[in-house]
Amino acid sequence: MIRKNLLGPLLVVVALLLATRPAHTQDTPAKTLAECIEIGLANHPSLKAASASVEAGNERVWEAASGYLPSLTAIYRADRQHTNLATSTGTVGTGGTSRTFNFYRGIVSFSQVLFDFGQTLDSIRAAQASRDALEADRNTQKASVIFGVKQAYFTLITAHHLLSVADETVRQNQQHLELAEGRHEVGLAPKIDVTTAKVQLSTSQLNQLTASNSLAIGRETLRNALGLDGPLTFDVVDLGEIRPNAPAANDAVQRAYDNRPELRSLQLQGQALEEQVSSLQKHYLPTINGNGQYQWAGSQYPLQDTWDLYATVNLTQFNFASVRAQIAEAKANLANLRYNEDVERQSIALEVRQAVLNVQQAVQSIDVARQGRDKARENLEIAEGRYQTGVGSIIELTDAQASRTTAEANYVQAQYSYETSLAALEKATGTDLSATNPNDISTRNLHE
């Protein structure tokens, strides 16, 4: 009696939620995986942040290169002094009577590095390596965005299929309830058959609600993976039935070592530190600068002009403690980076091997799940026929229906678990394993 009272409100809730779930009609635009990846690469804020870091690194290269450019200084002063003219101008004389007068001075000077034993060149190379490391970091972020889009894309397609399975299950359970009620009315089935069918129907409707909510969450997940602020205004293209092909994985780890941008970034950071050490070591050597100055001075116009050219030799040997400490720090940072590179290599190798095993399992799971789905469909047809003829029981029918629903869901999840596993292997190896043109990924049909 309690179940009967709850069934009415439950049906109302189901109807309301299904009416408000995202529509999937022919009028809704649909985008392929390649189109979604393009949107993600254009909009994701993490990629924009990485691009800004690369731009900053490029400016640091120019900053380091400015050491080869001359520095120019211009000064103009106008003073009102109370002194004698000889003292203020620095000329030789008796000094004369002190008085108040104006004095003007204009100076233009420059300094140019003539030779620094390669200090500036090493600094430029270090800045260039750091910039290239940031570029590799951007490629790492790009790979993460692509994988996130693929994962969300396949999850959304899975949610669509699971909702279709749930809808079909509700439809079939409604038919079973009508069949049980009809048999009960003519005295061919007990009351428990009707109540059992109602329980089965309400359970399938709850599963339908869960599937509908998973679809809405999938759309939000894809929107976030694309870096969009507004709602998702399009749907995704169904890949159809997937026939997987396990890619060759004999050299997968080596391909990852050759292509993963994380390793490239660490190697370039190490190169930057090596150049930094080289530049610091040359601080023990002198720097030769060329200098010049042109000056105008006097108490009234036209001012007297003078000029001079000279060279300076700057030595830092007396500051050797600071230089030695900087060199030791840079070498320690370099050693730390090399160890981190070894750690990264081990992590990459583990990630690749796990991804290979997951793909291999996913390939096998699809065949097993397909066979289970086909048998479950056949079993449900047999159970429906037996119940209609009065040979089978309602328990047999509901069990067959539950098995069919589980088998359908397992097949859907197995298919798109394969796609997600393949995307994870692509990210782990840093290579594209697609069997067809990525711009037409929606029509992919891998050979068996």
Image (cartoon, rainbow, N blue to C red):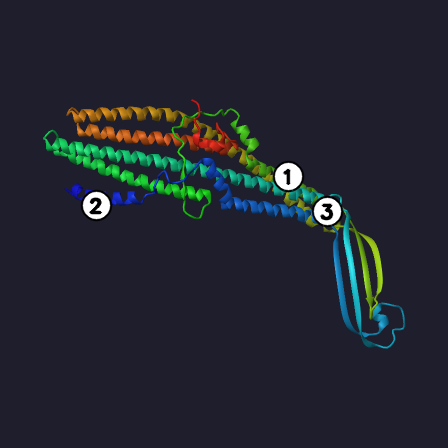
Label 3: element kind: helix
**What's the CA distance linking mark 3 and mark 1?**
19 Å
Q: Amino acid at mark 1?
A: Gln
Which mark, residue 9? 2
Q: Nearer the viewer, residue 264 or 370?
A: 370
Q: Amino acid at mark 2?
A: Pro
- The residue at which mark 1 appears reads as 271
Q: Nearer the viewer, residue 336 or 266?
A: 266
Mark 1 neighbour class, 10 Å CA radius: few under 14, some 14 to 19, many 20 or more: many
In the displayed structure, 223 sits above or below 433; it is: below
Residue depth check, mark 2 versus mark 1: number of the one nearer the observer: 2
Residue depth check, mark 3 versus mark 1: number of the one nearer the observer: 1
Label 1: element kind: helix
**What's the CA distance linking mark 2 and mark 1?**
69 Å
- The residue at which mark 3 appears reads as 283
In the displayed structure, 82 sits above or below 414; it is: below
